[in-house]
Image: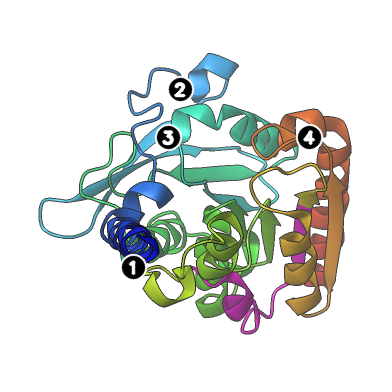
């Protein structure tokens, strides 16, 4: 009887592990949330241009460019794993108020973008957005700030390690997918079966630009220690900002403090770049 029970438990565990291995992309990407982009930057009073980036044959990535005639620089925004750019209007408005032009994109499979998301595809999408800013719009690498939110963090760090941006900003980001998954699914051998890396900490080793890391102690999805570990990994000059609120509302809860800290960081970086 005991052996029979153990056998059933073993089969159930193996089946669960196999299912997680096969369908793990569905545990990472949530493009169906807010897929229909209704609100636009115009909703919050911002002028904007639709941007279409041609990638693989038949695949186009959609984004918005919000200009500013007296821009102090440009910001490339790479969002998290759930929802589209239509849910990130606060980011665009904040950077516009700080004096920056901005470009935000939806990864493949998100919003109005075609194709399907994958780790390599998201890296390529970010590179295409960078190329659009530098080649099509004429921004110099040293004038561009790369911002990554949650899953956008490793994507932003991957790009910053290969480009030469003015600065890199990471908000509510994890050290790597295996690190985070091993905490969320501690009962499964996730380090063995993970098909995704998104190793933010490893990418940071090759980032020479100034780095700002922001994280909340109240983050219920990505523990605070991930933010601190990334800050420790980053090279100088670097800065850490402690936020308030949960994973999906920390930015809103800390809006005034976050904006002031971000403005000071960007001002200091711009002054250093001008010397």
Query: Going from the N terminus, do you reach mark 1 or mark 3 first?
Result: 3
Distance Cα–Cα, label 1 vs label 3: 19 Å
Residue, x 56% and y 44% (percent of image)?
102
Q: Spatial distance from mark 1 to mark 2, Cα to Cα? A: 28 Å
* Of residues 273 and 123, the one drawn nearer to the viewer in this rendering: 123
Label ID, residue 84:
3
Residue 245 image label: 4
> Between marks 4 and 2, how big is the CA–CA gap?
26 Å
First along the sequence among labels 1 and 2? 2
**Label 3–label 4 contact, CB within 8 A:** no
Which mark is in front, 4 or 2? Answer: 4
- The quarter holding residue 233 reads bottom right
Residue identifier under label 2: 40
Q: Earlier in the sequence, mark 3 or mark 2?
A: 2
Mark 4 vs 2, N-terminal side: 2
Give the CA separation, mark 3 to mark 2: 11 Å
Callout in the foreground (3, 4):
4
Label 4: which secondary element = loop
* Residue stretch in magenta: 198-214
Q: Where is residue 175 drawn, in percent x and y?
A: 63, 68
Q: Which mark lies nearer to you, 1 or 4?
A: 4
Q: Estimate how packed mark 2 is, as few (under 14), some (14 to 19) or many (20 or more) residues with alpha carbons within 10 Å.
A: some
174 horizontally vs 122: left or right: right
- Residue 147 placement: quadrant: bottom right
Residue 213 is a magenta residue: yes
Colour scheme of the picture: rainbow
Is the Cβ of the residue at disc 1 closer than 8 Å to that at disc 2? Answer: no
């Amino acid at each position: 009887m005991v052996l029979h029970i153990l056998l059933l438990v073993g089969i159930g565990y193996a089946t669960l592990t196999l299912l997680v291995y096969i369908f793990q992309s569905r545990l990472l990407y949530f493009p169906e949330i807010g897929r229909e982009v209704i609100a636009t930057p115009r909703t919050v009073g911002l002028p904007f241009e639709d941007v279409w980036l041609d990638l693989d044959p038949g695949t186009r990535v959609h984004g918005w460019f919000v200009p500013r005639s007296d821009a102090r620089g440009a910001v490339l925004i790479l969002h998290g794993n759930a929802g589209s750019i239509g849910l990130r209007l606060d980011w665009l408005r904040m950077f516009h108020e700080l004096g920056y032009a901005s470009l935000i994109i939806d990864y493949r499979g998100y919003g109005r973008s075609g194709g399907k998301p994958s780790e390599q595809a998201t890296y390529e999408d970010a590179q295409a957005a960078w190329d659009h800013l530098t080649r099509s719009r004429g921004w110099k690498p040293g004038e561009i700030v790369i911002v990554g939110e949650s899953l956008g963090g490793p994507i932003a760090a991957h790009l910053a390690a290969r480009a030469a941006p003015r600065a890199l900003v990471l908000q509510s980001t994890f050290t790597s997918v295996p690190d985070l998954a091993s905490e969320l699914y501690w009962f499964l051998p996730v380090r063995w079966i993970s098909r995704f890396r998104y190793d933010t900490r490893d990418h940071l080793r090759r980032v020479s630009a100034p780095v700002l890391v922001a994280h909340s102690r109240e983050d219920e999805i990505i523990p605070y220690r991930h933010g601190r570990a990334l800050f420790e990994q980053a090279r100088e000059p670097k800065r850490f900002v402690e936020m308030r609120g949960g994973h999906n509302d920390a930015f809103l809860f800390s809006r005034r403090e976050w904006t002031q800290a971000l403005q000071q960081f960007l001002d200091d970086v711009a002054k250093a770049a001008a010397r």
